[in-house]
Image (tube, rainbow, N blue to C red):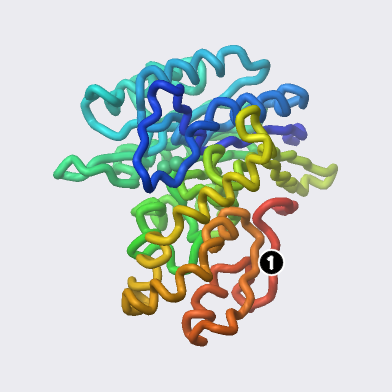
Amino acid sequence: MTPNFRFAVVSDLHIALPHTIWNHPSRFHLVEVSIPAFESVLEHLTQLDLDFLLLPGDLTQHGEPENHTWLQQRLAKLPFPTYVIPGNHDVPVIAGDSQSIGFQDFPQYYRKFGYENTEKLYYTCELLPGVRLVALNSNSFDAEGKQIGRLDEEQLQWLEIILESATDELVLATIHHNVAEHLPNQSHHPMASRYMLENASTLIEILQRFGVKLVFTGHLHIQDIANNHGVYDITTGSLVSYPHPYRIFEYHQNKYGNSRLQVLSYRVESVSEYPSLQTYSRQWMRDRSFPFLVKLLTLPPLNLSIAKAEELAPNLRDFWANIADGDTLFDHHPHFPAEVSRYFQAYGAISSSGSPALVDNNISLFL
Ligand SMILES: [Fe+2]
Ligand SMILES: [Fe+2]
């Protein structure tokens, strides 16, 4: 029987020491709060009797060596073990350059946080007796050297061997890219498909075959829990964008062997320089959403003209903040064409039958 345990997930920390912050006007993330927000989360987590902490990637702003070093030193002081994986921003280039570390350098920074073997960017370890972690690397590069979200053949084969030989009762998986759709038609949407793992269906088939039901992801910066053929993809929003969330999980098994995972979500409400972080950050996102909304409205399937998109966009300024919150229902918009209104309603927290399903933040998943 698996013991009951408690752990936390904090994703997309995008740690940026003040002198490493680069500014461009359309930046969507409030990296200024990365360190104080993480400290605020740690203050909470260190009061709990946590068994471990998972960080599913985008640990740093953009792979800067000083930001990786800062994080590695901070994690070493925690009273519980931490396990990390790389996000696209942690290993943005194959060979290190003036800004970022090289792809193969990543494990060197995190020897104490999963990477006992620094040869590979993925690993497995026993978290607790009978509980195993499979920590995957979804970052690779295509023939032109462009970064893509995909598991290579070698890693897939390794995964099958690991799962075949694992005798653990429970296996948890973590990977930066999404393995289930968190947005309507995410795999094919021109703006959202890059958040999905390209070969998610191959991974899901393997996980399903070996009874792995829980995958912890990041990358999309929203709070959402989705299911792909019986496998839950629990994606946690970013610590540097609204609503600055993190999650605590409690695993319980009763005497009949039935187990459930209790999901509890929290937010960083304030940090020293931003006493009303939630209000400030929601407004920050709202102020920067116009170009994103115009693009969304003019692309398929809506294909609106630029003029029409610019007319409608101001009414949708809170759309992405509401998505990031999770558990949001979108009302029919009285001034919108019916087709546009229906399109946005589909982004709401509704089940396939159309009824409300508030599953993104606080829920018990029966396994
Ligand atoms: Fe991110
Ligand atoms: Fe990412």
User: Which residue does the image show at 50% across and 39% down from the upper left?
Assistant: 30
What residue type is disc 1 on?
A: Ala
Q: Is residue 128 visible?
A: no
Using the rendered image of the protein, determine whether residue 225 is visible from the camera's viewpoint: yes
Above or below, comparing residue 286 to residue 313 in the picture: above
Instruction: Give the answer, above or below, for where 70 lies relative to 55.
Output: above
Q: Is residue 31 above or below residue 338?
A: above
Which residue sits at x=58%, y=35%? 10
- Residue in the image at 49% along x and 77% along y: 343
Decide which of 96, 239 is in the foreground and name it.
Answer: 239
Q: Residue at x 33, y 46 (%)?
A: 150
**Residue 316 left/right relative to 155:** right
The reply, left or right, for residue 1 in relation to residue 293 is right
Quadrant where the image shows the N terminus: top right
Q: Quadrant of residue 348?
A: bottom right
Left/right of residue 168 with respect to residue 62 in the rendered view: right
Q: Which residue is mark 1?
A: 357
Where is residue 144 shown, x and y percent of the image?
Answer: 14, 44
Question: Where in the image, quadrant-wise, is ligand 2 located?
Answer: top left
Q: Position of residue 216 (x, y in %)?
A: 55, 43
| Frontmost residue, 54 versus 366 | 54
| Residue in the foreground of this view, choosing between 189 and 288 | 288
- 51 left or right of 336? right
Assess disc 1: are there few (<14), some (14-19) or many (≥20) residues with their C-alpha within 10 Å of its C-alpha: some
Q: Position of residue 65 (x, y in %)?
A: 36, 19
How many marks the image carries: the answer is 1
> Residue 81's spot in the image, x, y percent?
61, 21
Give the answer, above or below, for where 101 lies relative to 22: above
**Residue positioned most to the left:** 144
Please tell me which residue lies in front, 281 or 296: 281
Assess mark 1: CB under 8 A from ligand 1? Answer: no
